[in-house]
Amino acid sequence: MNEMYFKSILISDVQKHKAYFQRFSKGFNVITSIDNHVGKSSLLKSLYYTLGAEVEYDAIWDKNSKLYEVNICVNGQDYRVARFQKNFAIFRGDDLILLTRSVSRDLAKKLCEILGFSVYLPNKNTKKTELAPPVFTFMPYYIDQDTGWSGLYNSFSQIDQYKKDDRVKSLYYHLNIYTRHTVELMAQRDTLKDETIQLEEDERRIKTILGGLVQEIQNLLPAETIDELERNLQIPKQEIAFLVKQMGEVRNKIQSLETTLQQHNHQLLVIQEYQKIKIKAVPAEKKSINVCPQCGYTFDEEIYNIVRSNYNMRNEEYMCQQIQLIIESINEELDDYKKQYIDLMAMLKEKEQAFDESQEAYEVYTRQRGLKDSVNHFNQQLGENEFRKTEIAKDIKQIGKELSKLPNKKEVEEKYIEYVRLNIIHLDAWTPSYEDNIKLLKPIKAQGTLENKIILAQVVGLFQTMEYFKSSAIRLPFVVDSPRAKEASLSSSKEILKLIFEVDMLPQVILATMDYNDFADEITTATDTIFLKEKRSLLNADSYLTNQVHIEDLLELLKDV
């Protein structure tokens, strides 16, 4: 049988230069006293703390000023493990085999090699199955005075990197039900189940989107092919271009006629003003400039001669009549072109509207095509999701087949229930409410004076189940502190102690309890008893002097990590 037990512990306060050294024997060890506050709990806490498990010391105990060293025996081989703060050293005999600050990586790996035992748990943050720190190897083997009697397997701290349900599943390793491979399979199965849940959520979301898209498509007008739409667009586009060209030509003609009309009106004005000046002007010497004596209009006779030559006429009145006729003719032609321009504008507006409608049809088509593409995409995704769900179901089924090859959990559970039930009865703590409530992974809760009995009954039931099924998992020392703390009666105290001394399937039991001599006669098991007398003086200067060289060597080594 694989086993480990403590041979000794050395605790040193490197600041106060005090120490305490204690040997332990294989089998049953009892640490007792008449008074409280003599260091029983601190001594027990330090055992598994030295091996990398975190515990809560009393407020007056400065664990960071202490150097700890335990001597352990594993299957006949001696090892020493030293700890100072977060630094660890492991020796095989006198050979240093590990020096590290890493509990979860280096220390856990080395202890796994030494003990031939390890626990693998899925990290709740990374979701990956990993080698768990040593605390989960020791978890069922220590009951702390302060926290261990308020909840089953509640004695160690700093274990929140794993879910509570996964932490308690570490018990399956001690029962040889779980291995690293089985936990990896279960973690894989959980991941696949989570993926299935996500796929189902995606499926509901996609179906909602598809319902909206299909409704939107139904509200759109049916469309022909994109090529046909583009050809139809070219027709109004060409007609618009032709109309714009025509309108440009008409506009140019209008502008030309307006310019000509303006010229004729000006020339008519020149002739008319010349006539006025000629009538009203006082005879004078011949001048090149004529000025109207009434309005002051200055008339250049050279301009008049140019106008008269344009019409090839000498008579001003007749010339005015002819110019009037030309102006009227231009006005008529100008009106025709303006009407033509207005008509062309109306036609252009009509064509532009037709072009806009074609553009709208084009947009409808492209929108419809886009929606159809989206519908096709989501339908494809829906099909892929369904296929993936089918594949996941197959994988989960295959994992289930592999896990079914493990030792029969149901049979193990039934035997555990049987032992726990008998233990509770022997402790005179049985009530009908416990019937059908005993479960390996869901501890029974009790209150008051019964709480210690119920917790102890379950822990011992675990060890008994391990022994019944001959689990190959290593057996470790059972360290139990103050199991009678909540018990008022003498008979209850005897029942508790007797059950602890029945734990002979383990290599070692280290028990701390008050007034053990009052019950020693009731215990027939051979026991090494350690008496502590001095209050708050567990560590002393004499012990430090005795071990000073060794302490200082260890401290120098650990400080350099």
Image (cartoon, helix red, strand yellow):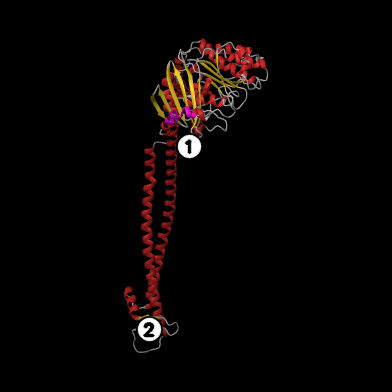
* Residue carrying label 2: 290
Q: Which mark is residue 120?
A: none
Please name whichever residue, 377 or 480, is drawn nearer the observer in this view of the structure: 480
Quadrant housing the C terminus = top left
What's drawn in magenta, residue-wise? 544-554
Left or right, 18 with reference to 365: right
> What element does badge 2 sit on?
strand
Q: How far across and down, in percent of the image, does residue 69 sit?
A: 47, 26
* Residue carrying label 1: 220
Please name whichever residue, 24 or 112, is drawn nearer the observer in this view of the structure: 24
Residue drawn at x 43%, y 56% is 342
> What element does badge 1 sit on?
loop
Residue drawn at x 58%, y 15% is 500
**Quarter location, residue 224:** top left
Above or below, 296 against 139 in this view is below
Q: Earlier in the sequence, mark 1 or mark 2?
A: 1
- Per the model, the C-alpha gap separating discs 1 and 2 is 80 Å
Instruction: Indicate whether residue 436 is drawn in magenta.
Output: no
Q: How far across and down, in percent of the image, does residue 527 sit?
A: 55, 14
Instruction: Indicate whether residue 548 is drawn in magenta.
Output: yes
Residue 381 seen in the figure:
no
Please name whichever residue, 168 or 496, is drawn nearer the observer in this view of the structure: 496
The residue at the far bottom in this view is 284
Left or right, 288 with reference to 90: left
Left or right, 143 with reference to 328: right
Residue drawn at x 40%, y 34% is 560
Magenta span: chief secondary structure: helix
Q: Amino acid at mark 1?
A: Leu
Q: Residues within 10 Å of mark 1 (few under 14, many from 20)?
A: few
Q: How far across and down, in percent of the image, does residue 110 sit?
A: 41, 24
Above or below, 161 against 365 in this view is above
**Quarter location, residue 436:** top right
